[in-house]
């Protein structure tokens, strides 16, 4: 049985053509729905940070010198039935198909899915302080991908979690710091304490991708990101919650 995630090219083309419309597909005999979390992300960023540093995403990129190459942000895959996923190999190398999705869409969230048996106990469990946007891997490390997962078979993680993971493109960290009157050390700053003094609700899934880990009891969830392009933070929605599973991948 093959568990390496593959998404048909036609599904990707369809979602790019009409990002507001989810597409359906099958993986083995299991059905899934695929959707974009935030469409036209650059425009939403430019509109929200209008005048902070330039106007329009191209000018913001030019003036900050922070690479930004996402049309839409976040791909969400939801399976009908629990799906085992083999996301990486014995050398902790992330599958090439997932890397392609991350390059194109930024973070990948897979719901009603769990890590294959041989990988389930690997890695560690982490939780970070509330709303400190950071990267997990330094620029000199080779394993730049973070994979977070909620194990539906685990006594603790089978419960929905009361804290979320928030994800933004790097450029949002810098712009938000400026908006809050902070002085980032450089456009490459990798830790921001931001968004603490406002109601985040209107920004969720507009500027900030929200992964709440709130699927029903005993539902597996996986979230994968590239630390070179994405900042992430814990968000204590109701309470701190339990540490989430983490692997760092090549
Ligand atoms: Fe982290």
Image (cartoon, grey):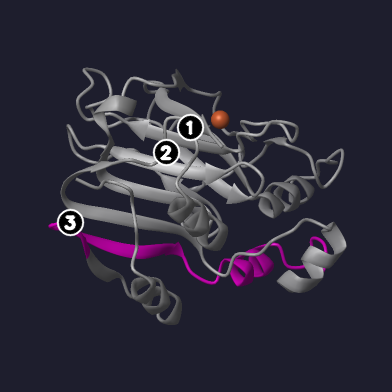
At 84% across and 66% down in the image, what residue appears? 62
Direction from residue 45 to residue 199 in the image, left or right: left
x and y percentages locating residue 28 in the rendered image: 17, 56
User: How many marks are shown on the rendered structure?
Assistant: 3
Q: Disc 1 marks which residue?
A: 92
> Disc 3 or 1, which lies upstream in sequence?
3
Q: Disc 2 marks which residue?
A: 88
Residue neighbourhood size for the residue with mark 1, other residues' Cα within 10 Å, grouped as few (<14), some (14–19), many (≥20): some
The alpha-carbon separation of the residues under discs 2 and 1 comes to 6 Å
On screen, 117 above or below 10?
Answer: above
Question: What segment carries the magenta color?
Answer: 26-55
Q: Quadrant of the C terminus?
A: top right
At 40% across and 26% down in the image, what residue appears? 244
> Disc 3 or 2, which lies upstream in sequence?
3
- Are the residues at dot 2 and dot 1 in contact (C-beta closer than 8 Å)? yes
Q: Quadrant of ligand 1?
A: top right
Q: Disc 3 marks which residue?
A: 28
x and y percentages locating residue 242 in the rendered image: 37, 21
């Amino acid at each position: 049985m093959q568990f390496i995630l593959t998404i048909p090219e036609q599904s990707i083309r369809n979602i790019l053509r009409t990002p507001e419309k989810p597409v359906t597909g099958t993986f083995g005999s299991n059905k899934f729905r695929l959707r974009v979390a935030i469409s036209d992300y650059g425009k939403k960023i430019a509109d929200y940070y209008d005048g902070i540093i330039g106007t329009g995403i191209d000018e913001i990129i030019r003036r900050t010198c922070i690479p930004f190459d996402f049309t839409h942000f976040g791909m969400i895959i939801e399976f009908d039935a629990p799906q085992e996923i083999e996301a990486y190999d014995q050398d902790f190398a992330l599958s090439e198909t997932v890397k392609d999705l991350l390059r194109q869409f930024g973070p990948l969230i897979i719901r009603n899915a769990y890590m294959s048996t041989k990988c389930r106990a690997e890695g560690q469990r982490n939780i970070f302080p509330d709303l400190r946007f950071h990267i997990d891997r330094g620029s000199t490390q080779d394993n730049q991908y973070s994979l977070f997962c909620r194990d539906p078979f685990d006594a603790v993680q089978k419960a929905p979690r009361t804290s979320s993971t928030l994800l933004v493109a790097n450029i949002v960290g810098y712009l938000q710091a400026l908006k809050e009157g902070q002085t980032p050390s450089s456009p490459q700053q990798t830790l921001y304490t931001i968004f603490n003094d406002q109601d985040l609700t209107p920004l969720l899934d507009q500027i900030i991708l929200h992964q709440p880990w709130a699927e029903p009891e005993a539902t597996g969830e996986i979230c994968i990101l590239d630390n070179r392009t994405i900042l992430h933070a814990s968000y204590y929605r109701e309470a701190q919650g339990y540490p989430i599973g983490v692997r760092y991948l090549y």
